[in-house]
C-alpha cells in the first residue's frame, strides 16, 4: 500500500477560482508528449488496455452528467457556474487526453464505434433523478465520487511504467483532488446556510460508497470488451474473468488511507474526533472495497 498523502499535496493543485479548463496554470493537451510514448512499455498490457479505455469512455461521457448537475444547482449561481465552466471542461479534457493516448497505443481499436454503443446505454443512466434530491447530500456524494476517481487514477499511475502515461495520469489525478476540494468547499457553504444532520451526511456517504462498487466503469468495460477486435483476443479470457481481474486490481491497490481521510471530511468533525474515527473507519472501508 502506497502512502498516498506523500504523493499528493492538497495545496498544489491550483486555486479555487472559476474560469475554464484553459485557466492559467492548468495543463493542456499540448503539454502531453503523445509522440514520445514508449509503445513497448504499454502496448502488451492487457489490464491497462481495459482500465484506460473504460476511463476514456466515462470521462468523455461526462458532459451529460455535468449538465444535469449544473441544473440541479441552478439556485446557486457560483456552484452552477463552476460546474459548467470549469468542472465539465476539465472532465472532458480528461476524456480527450485519454482517448488520444489509447488511440496512439492501440490504433486498430474502433474507439468512436465502441464509445457510441457505450453512450447509448450510459446516457440512460445519467438522469436528474439519479441525483440526490437534497443538494447538501448530493455534494457529499460528489465528494465520494471524486475520492473514488482520485484513488482510481492514483492506482493506474502506480501500475504504469510508460512515462507519458504517468505524466498524464498525474495531471488527471491532481484535477480530481481539486474537484474534491471544490465540492467540499461548496458543501461547507451550504451547511453554513442550513445544516443537515451528521447522521444524514453519514448515510449519504455510506450509500454512495456502496454504489461505487457498481460503478459506471462496469458499463464501459463491457463495451470495451465487445469491441476489442484483435487486441488480446487470443488470451481466451471471458468477460467475467476480465471484469473480476480489473475489479481486483483496482480494489486491492486502492490507497485506502487517504481515501478515508478524504471521505471523513464532509462530516465536518472536530479534529480530535476525526482522528479517533480514522482507524476503525479505515478498516471498514478497506473491507468494503476489497470484499
Ligand atoms: Fe476526471
Ligand atoms: Fe473529477
Image (spheres, helix red, strand yellow):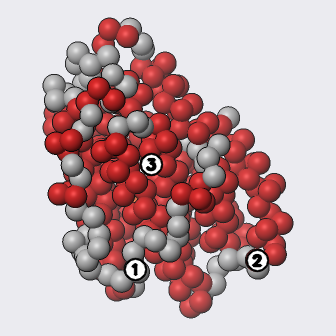
Left or right? Give the position of 77 relative to 190: left
Which residue is depicted at the point 59% across and 59% down? Answer: 6
Residue 232 figure quarter = top left
Up the image or down, 280 lies above or below 75; here it is above
Which residue bears the numbered disc 3? Answer: 153
**Callout 2 touching callout 3 (CB < 8 Å):** no
Which residue is depicted at the point 81% across and 75% down? Answer: 272
The C terminus lies in which quarter of the figure?
A: top right
Which residue is depicted at the point 36% across and 58% down? Answer: 171
Pair 1/2: label in front: 1
Q: Label 2 neighbourhood size at 10 Å, few (<14), some (14-19), many (20+)?
A: few
Q: Would residue 134 be seen by someone viewing this image from the given angle?
A: no
How much space separates mark 2 and mark 3, taking CA atoms?
28 Å
Up the image or down, 15 lies above or below 233; here it is below
Left or right? Give the position of 250 relative to 93: right
Which residue bears the numbered disc 1? Answer: 15
How much space separates mark 1 and mark 2, taking CA atoms?
24 Å
How much space separates mark 1 and mark 3, taking CA atoms?
21 Å
Of residues 75 and 12, the one drawn nearer to the viewer in this rendering: 12
Q: Earlier in the sequence, mark 1 or mark 3?
A: 1
Which residue bears the numbered disc 2? Answer: 271
Q: Label 3 neighbourhood size at 10 Å, few (<14), some (14-19), many (20+)?
A: many
Q: Label 1 neighbourhood size at 10 Å, few (<14), some (14-19), many (20+)?
A: few
Question: Is the CB of the residue bearing disc 3 within 8 angstroms of ligand 1?
Answer: yes
Amino acid at each position: 500500500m502506497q502512502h498516498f498523502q506523500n504523493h499528493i499535496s492538497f495545496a498544489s493543485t491550483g486555486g479555487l477560482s472559476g474560469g475554464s479548463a484553459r485557466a492559467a496554470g492548468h495543463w493542456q493537451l499540448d503539454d502531453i508528449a503523445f509522440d514520445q510514448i514508449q509503445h513497448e512499455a504499454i502496448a502488451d498490457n492487457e489490464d491497462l488496455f481495459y482500465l484506460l479505455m473504460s476511463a476514456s469512455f466515462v470521462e468523455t461521457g461526462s458532459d451529460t452528467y455535468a449538465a444535469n448537475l449544473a441544473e440541479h444547482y441552478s439556485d446557486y449561481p457560483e456552484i452552477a457556474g463552476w460546474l459548467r465552466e470549469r468542472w465539465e471542461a476539465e472532465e472532458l479534457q480528461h476524456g480527450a487526453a485519454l482517448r488520444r493516448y489509447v488511440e496512439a497505443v492501440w490504433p486498430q481499436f474502433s474507439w468512436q464505434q465502441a464509445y457510441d454503443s457505450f453512450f447509448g446505454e450510459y446516457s440512460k443512466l445519467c438522469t436528474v433523478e439519479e441525483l440526490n434530491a437534497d443538494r447538501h447530500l448530493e455534494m457529499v456524494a460528489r465528494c465520494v465520487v471524486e475520492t473514488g476517481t482520485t484513488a482510481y487514477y492514483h492506482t493506474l499511475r502506480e501500475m504504469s511504467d510508460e512515462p507519458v502515461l504517468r505524466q498524464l495520469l498525474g495531471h488527471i489525478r491532481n484535477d480530481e483532488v481539486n474537484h474534491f476540494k471544490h465540492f467540499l468547499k461548496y458543501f461547507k457553504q451550504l451547511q453554513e446556510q442550513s445544516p443537515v444532520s451528521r447522521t444524514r451526511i453519514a448515510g449519504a456517504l455510506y450509500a454512495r460508497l456502496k454504489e461505487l462498487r457498481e460503478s459506471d466503469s462496469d458499463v464501459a468495460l463491457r463495451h470495451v470488451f465487445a469491441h476489442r477486435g484483435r487486441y488480446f483476443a487470443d488470451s481466451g479470457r471471458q468477460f467475467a474473468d476480465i471484469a473480476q481481474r480489473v475489479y481486483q486490481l483496482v480494489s486491492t491497490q486502492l490507497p485506502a488511507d487517504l481515501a478515508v481521510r478524504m471521505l471523513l471530511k464532509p462530516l465536518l468533525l472536530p479534529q480530535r474526533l476525526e482522528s479517533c474515527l480514522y482507524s476503525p473507519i479505515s478498516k471498514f472501508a478497506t473491507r468494503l472495497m476489497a470484499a
